[in-house]
Amino acid sequence: MFGNALGEALAVQMVIGNAVQVPDGLFTPASTLTSVLTMGIGNEMMGTVYSDVLWSLALLLLAMSFVFISIIHFIERKGGLNANGR
């Protein structure tokens, strides 16, 4: 499961260009939370401001995942989707 998530994140990272800039338009290079984490977390010393920012981004990504998974479970319980996805 972790390998699939990492592979998909790195594929998205390569497709969007992994540029550390604010995109000007839809087709300009950009970067995702996951790509910022994968590129920066291994090169930073603990206790620095940038390391704290990276851990905050990881917490934000975890919170977003939790919210989206909770919404999906809520929709499933209401009967919007069954186990087969129909």
Image (cartoon, rainbow, N blue to C red):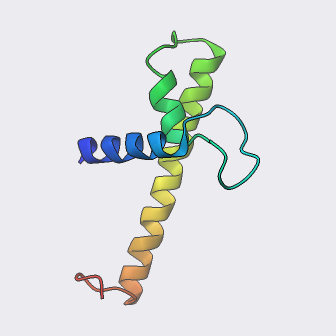
Q: Is residue 15 left or right of residue 23?
A: left
Residue drawn where x is 39% and y is 73% of the image = 73
Residue drawn where x is 56% and y is 28% of the image = 54
**Residue 81 vs residue 74, the one in the foreground:** 81
- Expressed as whole percent of the image width and height from the top left, the position of residue 2 reads 27, 43
**Residue 73 vs residue 30, the one in the foreground:** 30
Q: Is residue 3 left or right of residue 55?
A: left
**Residue 63 vs residue 86, the one in the foreground:** 86
Q: Quadrant of residue 26?
A: bottom right
Q: Quadrant of residue 30?
A: top right
In the image, residue 16 above or below residue 55 = below
In the image, residue 43 above or below residue 8 = above
Q: Is residue 74 left or right of residue 52?
A: left
Residue drawn where x is 36% and y is 81% of the image = 76
Label total for image: 0
Residue drawn where x is 60% and y is 23% of the image = 52
- Expressed as whole percent of the image width and height from the top left, the position of residue 49 reads 65, 17
Q: On the rendered image, what quadrant is the C terminus found in?
A: bottom left
The single residue placed furthest to the front in the displayed view is 27
- Expressed as whole percent of the image width and height from the top left, the position of residue 4 reads 27, 47
- Expressed as whole percent of the image width and height from the top left, the position of residue 5 reads 32, 46
